[in-house]
Image (cartoon, rainbow, N blue to C red):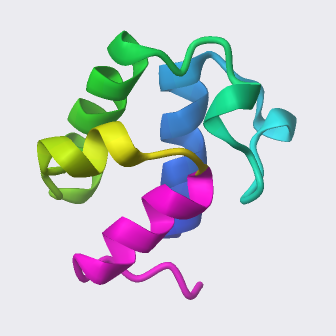
Amino acid sequence: MSNREKLKQLLGEVFLLSEDEISLDLRKDQIETWDSLGVVSLAVGVQETFGYHFAPEEAVGLNSVRDIISILSKGGIPFDD
């Protein structure tokens, strides 16, 4: 499974989204469940799935799927698949 697929699966589980609702252009303001608890759940899921620990300012600064991929890519997790 590619990292994009893993992230898509994680986002679906954390934010209770169907696969067809998730895209690179998806933003925080489009997801009702992307609240403070969602951020914590996302951070835990990213840690478990990718081994990356968001700094607090990174986690609260996330506004889109692209932001998540950008931070993980900078952390050495490839998304060029």
Residue 74 lies in the magenta-colored region: yes
Percent coordinates x, y for residue 55 in the rendering: 13, 50
- Residue 61 in the image: x percent, y percent? 37, 46
Whether residue 36 is visible to the viewer of this picture, yes or no, is yes
- Locate residue 64 relative to residue 62 in the image: left or right: right
Answer with the quarter of the image where residue 15 lies.
top right
* Residue 68 spot, x, y in % from top left: 45, 57
**Horizontal relation, residue 27 to residue 44: left or right:** right
Q: Residue furthest bottom?
A: 80
Q: Residue at x 52, y 69 (%)?
A: 2
At 37% from the left edge and 78% from the top edge, which residue is drawn?
73
Q: Which residues are magenta?
A: 65-81
Vertical position of residue 21 compared to residue 58: above or below: above
Residue 17 sits above or below residue 73 on the image: above
Tell me, yes or no, if residue 1 can be seen here: no
| Residue 46 is covered by the magenta coloring | no
Up the image or down, 29 lies above or below 61; here it is: above
Residue with the most extreme right position: 20
Viewer-proximal residue, 19 or 31? 31
Q: Quadrant of residue 52?
A: bottom left
